Image: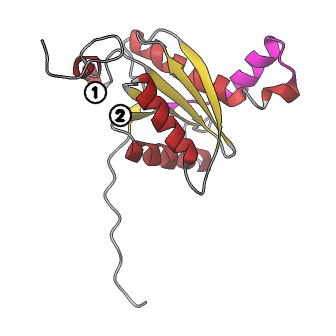
């Protein structure tokens, strides 16, 4: 019998969160995040990493970061082994302002978590989410409250599918050097 804490299903949490090949997280719940300027979509996978489902749409809190705290609480509550944040690159693959904001958000989230945060290229997921909601009969004016969740589901499902196919499931955040204070005239 192990001295390590047991997870929700009684399994060894250290074994459940053990790194898989390529530094990716082993089987367990993953959370997907779609970062917007006003809202943040949140999705979760099942414990075996097959299906993503919507969890919540959070109001973006630029001042206090309560949205980041809510995600950290979801990680804890669900026993998640990792988080994937969508990285909205341009069609040419470049990183614009939205991608920089998503990276900054992921960095802030990583500082609150003990599980890894990865970035996943999510070009056009919001467009796809709107299209899927329209096809399913959700009126355009009603899509606003759920489109971020739907985009988070698409991001997370793409990651789960990539993992099963043996492809990279995003990229880990790179550790950044701490900022140093510049000396000079004040």
Relative height, residue 68 to residue 145 (above, below): below
Image mark for residue 183: none
Residue 96 point in image, percent of width and height: 59, 48
Residue 100 point in image, percent of width and height: 53, 49
Q: On the image, numbered disc 1 is attached to which residue?
A: 23
User: Secondary structure beneath disc 1?
Assistant: helix
On the picture, is 113 further left or further right than 156? left
Quadrant of the rendered structure where residue 39 is? Answer: top right
User: Secondary structure beneath disc 2?
Assistant: loop
Residue 48 point in image, percent of width and height: 40, 9
Reading the chain from its start, which is encountered first: label 1 or label 2? Answer: 1
Magenta extent: 120-139
On the picture, is 150 further left or further right than 81? right
Q: How many marks?
A: 2
Quadrant of the rendered structure where residue 117 is? Answer: top left
- Residue displayed at 52% across by 31% down: 121
- Residues at marks 1 and 2 touching, judged by CB atoms closer than 8 Å: yes
Q: On the image, numbered disc 2 is attached to which residue?
A: 116
Where's the N terminus, which quadrant? Answer: top left
């Amino acid at each position: 019998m192990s001295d390590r804490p047991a997870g929700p299903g009684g399994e060894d949490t250290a074994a459940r969160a053990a790194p898989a090949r390529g530094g990716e997280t082993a089987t367990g719940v993953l959370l997907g995040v779609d970062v917007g300027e006003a809202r943040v979509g949140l999705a979760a996978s099942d414990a075996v990493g097959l299906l993503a489902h919507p969890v919540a749409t959070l109001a973006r809190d630029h001042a206090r970061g309560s949205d980041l705290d809510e995600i950290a609480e979801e990680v804890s509550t669900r026993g998640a082994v990792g988080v994937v944040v969508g990285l909205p690159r341009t069609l040419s693959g470049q990183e614009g302002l939205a991608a920089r904001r998503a990276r900054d958000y992921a960095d802030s989230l990583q500082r609150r978590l003990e599980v890894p945060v990865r970035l996943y290229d999510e070009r056009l997921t919001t467009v796809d989410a709107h299209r899927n909601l329209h096809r399913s009969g959700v009126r355009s004016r009603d899509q606003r409250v759920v489109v971020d969740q739907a985009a988070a589901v698409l991001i997370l499902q793409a990651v789960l599918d990539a993992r099963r196919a043996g492809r990279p499931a995003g990229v880990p955040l790179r550790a950044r050097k701490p900022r140093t204070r510049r000396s000079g005239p004040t």
